[in-house]
Amino acid sequence: MKTLDHWIGGKTVEGASGNHGPVTDPATGAQTTRVALASAEDVDAAVAAAQAAYQTWGTSSLAARTAVLFRYRALLDAHRDELAALITAEHGKVHSDALGEVARGLEIVELACGITTQLKGELSTQVSNRVDVAAIRQPLGVVAGITPFNFPAMVPMWMFPLAIACGNTFVLKPSEKDPSPAIRLAELATEAGLPDGVLNVVNGDKAAVDRLLVHPDVAAVSFVGSTPIARHIHATASAHGKRVQALGGAKNHMLVLPDADLDAAADAAVSAAYGSAGERCMAISAVVAVGPVGDELVAKIRDRAEKIKIGPGGDPASEMGPLITRAHRDKVASYVHGAAEQGAEVVLDGTGFTVEGYEDGHWIGLSLLDRVSTDSDAYRDEIFGPVLCVLRADSYEDGVRLINESPFGNGTAVFTRDGGAARRFQLEVQAGMVGVNVPIPVPVGYHSFGGWKDSLFGDHHIYGNDGVHFYTRGKVVTTRWPNPEDGGVDLGFPKNH
């Protein structure tokens, strides 16, 4: 069985704790790897390597940094299939979806390659007599990233390329459920010429996270995961003087107005709800049907959902793979089992699904729940599986009110042909990312990703301009070169003249 250790100081390092966790193939249920679980000592070693590397990387030229990043981008492009195969083997998503994940991560590497324009700074000359003022941005030092299982390559690439482009060094703690892609990303960075210690990976669980949150040499923490953990990350790291961006959970709504193209809306709902087995923070998990279109829309969704091919992620015929673990599969199934008791109509029940020849895999089929109440568990909780809830609303106003009353505010979408209604929606809905006839409105790399309310803790979204600002801090320099005849004491307030 393969053993996966840590990546510290540009090389593989065995864990000091001696503790390991299982990594399984979700399609078979079989353990394929044992991953080292970091102790506080392991985390300290990674932070020390990052701190040592920062002494030179933090003052390196922009040209030197971007040269490494351009080589890194080329290596990632050449290894797309390999990275996607690692994702499929440990996460379970189909290969085409894994390739898409790598492609979206590459967008941020490309953004980092252009960091020179992001860090130009500002200069105002002659603000007073022979006085100039410059605003510059400088790196923070050692920063850390804690990333989820559902995007084991993309979310790390949302963080560390920008961080190191800005001059920081990085300690990444990926999910222990599918850690191999993160290690491979670090290996390729070293191959691209990234100096030892600039990017480190410590595998582990809560013990590793807790140490990162309080370590005195960690200046900032980026996190993507569930809302309860995001709230804990933000509170703990902030209390220890760190800058924090913690992206939490979601319950993304899709509002379908009576004038919408229902075929397009049904296609979008199925794609956005069931893609990657619903294990996406931007998945549509609640469709709000307005007025008389509900019954027809549900029928169209059901017709499409019943035709989805579920199977191993490595099978080119598969459109949806298994869930990450058996425990998660059972938890997702529990929401479907309890839905009818809480007033929902179970249109499709996928909880009994299995794949012939892969009976021990973490399989679940597509579930569709109609007339779901807002006080039911299936609606209130982030299920993170292939379960789509349909709610009914009498009007546009009722639908928007329903969405805005949700504690989550990650992403949302409206389907309509009415430009006026779409404009109202994008201004009135309380969410950080909005799609108009776009079900999963994940921004491109040069815009920032992040939600509102319980979907984000901290002031900065991730990547884009917000990412650059998060990984740097501002400094203002006021300069005056006086003439020889200048002098004398003046206790008055400085004047701009």
Image: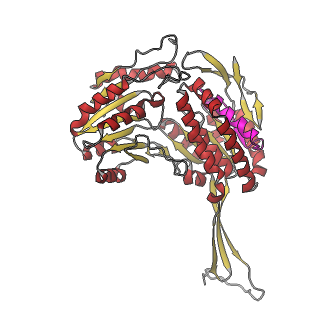
User: Is the N terminus in the top left, top right, bottom left or bottom right quadrant?
Assistant: top right
- Which residue, as the protein is rendered here, is positioned at the far front? 317
In front of the other: 107 or 43 = 107
Residue at image point 25% right, 32% down:
296
Q: Position of residue 393 (x, y in %)?
A: 25, 39
Residue 41 is left or right of residue 83, and the answer is right
Q: Is residue 409 visible?
A: no
Residue at image point 75% right, 49% down:
54
Does 15 appear above or below 403?
Answer: above
Corner quadrant of residue 189: top right
Q: Which residues are magenta?
A: 177-206
Q: Position of residue 182 (x, y in %)?
A: 65, 34
Corner quadrant of residue 382: top left
Q: Is residue 237 magenta?
A: no
Q: Position of residue 349 (x, y in %)?
A: 35, 20
Residue at image point 29% right, 37% down:
262
Q: Is residue 199 magenta?
A: yes
Residue 278 is left or right of residue 76, and the answer is left
How was this image coloured? secondary structure
